[in-house]
Amino acid sequence: MTTTIIVAYAPTESADKTEKDTYYSQLRSAIESVPLHDFLAILTDANARLGLDKVLHSYNPTTNDNGKRHIDVMDVYQLLAANTLFKKRKGKL
């Protein structure tokens, strides 16, 4: 089995729509270039807030625009945000 790691840094929440669209288009292209049998890990600072409306454990009550975009990518490619799978103690949020 081959491991593919994609490292990315997303535009901030205040970036313009075009910059965000470009980033997510490039991220999708990178994901699609990975063979289906590879183990894929995406290490990113997505500048996203995933709220309790979208994930099980979150510090944020709602999801911001970057979070919605990030979740769209995760849904399309059947990915998960591993850091939201476990409840963290208050000092680690």
Image: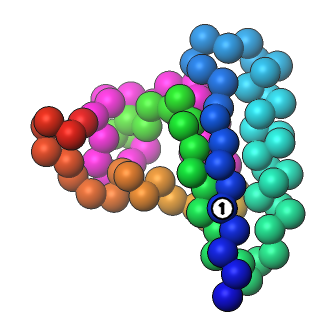
Q: Quadrant of the C terminus?
A: top left
Residue at image position (65%, 32%) is 10
Q: Residues within 10 Å of mark 1 (few under 14, many from 20)?
A: some
Q: Quadrant of the N terminus?
A: bottom right
Displayed quadrant of residue 41: bottom right
Magenta stretch: residue 70 in it?
Answer: yes
- What is the span of residues highlighted in magenta in the rendered image? 54-75
Residue at image position (80%, 68%) is 34
Q: Is residue 18 left or right of residue 89?
A: right
Q: Position of residue 76 (x, y in %)?
A: 69, 57
State the residue in front, 59 or 92: 92
Magenta stretch: residue 41 in it?
Answer: no
Displayed quadrant of residue 39: bottom right
The total number of labels drawn is: 1
Q: Is residue 45 left or right of residue 54?
A: right
Residue at the left extreme, as displayed:
90
Residue at image position (74%, 26%) is 20
Let me know if residue 3 appears in the view: yes
* Residue type, numbered disc 1: Ile
Q: Is residue 18 above or below residue 93?
A: above
Q: Secondary structure at mark 1?
A: strand
- Would you name the residue on which mark 1 appears? 5
Q: Position of residue 72 (x, y in %)?
A: 64, 45
Residue at the bottom extreme, as displayed:
1
State the residue in front, 7 or 57: 7
Q: Is residue 81 left or right of residue 1?
A: left
Q: Is residue 13 above or below residue 35?
A: above
Displayed quadrant of residue 4: bottom right
Residue at image position (38%, 35%) is 51
